[in-house]
Amino acid sequence: MLPEEIAAWLTENGEKKFRAGQIFHWLTAGVRDFSEMSDLSKPLRDKLAEHFFLTPPTVLREQRSARDGTVKYLWRLADGNAVESVLMRYSYGDSACISTQVGCRMGCAFCASTGMGLVRNLLPSEMLDQLRCIELAAGVKLSHVVLMGIGEPLDNFENVMRFLELVNRPEGMNLGMRHISLSTCGLTEGIDKLASYRLQCTLSVSLHAPDDETRNQIMPANRSRGVAELMRACRDYYEKTGRRISFEYALIRGVNDSPEQAKLLAGLVKPLGGHVNLIPLNEVEGSPLHPGDAKAFAARLKELGVNVTVRRRLGTDIDAACGQLRRKQATGNK
Ligand code: SAH
């Protein structure tokens, strides 16, 4: 709840409105129980416990990379479901990658999160809890957040928007919109809706193929709208928000790494001043898809005048890629 919503509830229930600030502060600090809100009276704490519930997750598994300090968390949610978050330590600050859904229904062929389908949406509080619990567990102050864990953020639109508002609040975590990235597989209606809010967060579009034939094959969500309509939504987003879009492109050998596809990709992103983030594909156990040569593809794109980087891989020794821990948990593999 936002501070003003807490205040409204307090007023309706015969309590002093200014307590809302204290309560919001305690929630931001990550208390696990109302009894920890030590500057509130006992009767008020009891009343809160009667009407509300706090459901912080517990750690099911924690893996630390010996190479680069990346920490991956598998959380157990209050209803027994599990989701993942990753803490990444960059020179510019500590960044968390969090999940937005339990599972995913987008069906991307290369992704470890989608095999078991969508179980449910995460609540705004469950997204916030991932941040707070990382801060408490690792003793860090997060400066950046990416919505790039399990799930499709634009398939859980209302909850994600409320999360963004909460995390952005100066009385709360006070994270600037420019320090938040939202990654989508390209749901055009969602991009249009997001554009209408004119937020300053960074939009990452997981493009992964510049032609409908390939994209339909590896990203079934493409089948209803297609690449041209996706690029139309991206152009509108850029025009409305003034924010350049980052295009994610995971190189899959023999699927999306041909010279023709590099040319098509350049033709799509250059007019938008977009940036291409090449990701060497993370191999998922049992998958027939294998990584392509990111360096060679990057060189080709550069020649074509595209603004391109190859994503530095963190946590490769700890399965830090999307969905891998939850998948192992669910399939009983170690
Ligand atoms: N649903 C959102 C966010 C979650 S996926 C989206 O599609 O963007 C986060 C990113 O990881 C996306 O760019 C996704 O395409 C990419 N990804 C998923 N599986 C991958 C894999 N095996 N190797 C490399 N990138 C992968």
Image (spheres, rainbow, N blue to C red):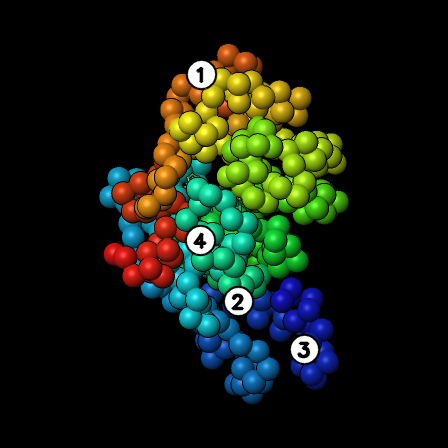
Residue 114: image x %, image y %? 47, 52
Residue that label 3 marks? 10
Sequence-wise, the earlier of marks 3 and 1 is: 3
Mark whose residue sits in front, 4 or 1: 4
Residue 26 seen anywhere in this rendered image of the structure: yes
Above or below 203: residue 39: below
Q: Which residue is drawn at 53% across and 18% down?
A: 260
Residue that label 2 marks? 27
Report how far apart the C-alphas of labels 3 and 1 lie in the structure: 60 Å
Frontmost residue, 331 versus 138: 331
Above or below 231: residue 300: above
Ligand 1 lies under 8 Å from the Cβ of mark 3: no
Query: Of the residues shown, which amino acid type is indicated by label 4?
Result: Gly
Report how far apart the C-alphas of labels 2 and 4 lie in the structure: 34 Å
Name the quadrant containing residue 325: bottom left
Sequence-wise, the earlier of marks 4 and 3 is: 3
Is label 1 in a helix, a strand or a loop?
A: helix
Query: Of the residues shown, which amino acid type is indicated by label 1?
Result: Ala
Residue that label 1 marks? 299
Query: Of the residues shown, which amino acid type is indicated by label 3?
Result: Leu
Ligand 1 lies under 8 Å from the Cβ of mark 2: no
Residue that label 4 marks? 115
Sequence-wise, the earlier of marks 2 and 3 is: 3
Task: Report crowding for label 2: few under 14, some 14 to 19, many 20 or more residues within 10 A (C-alpha).
Answer: many
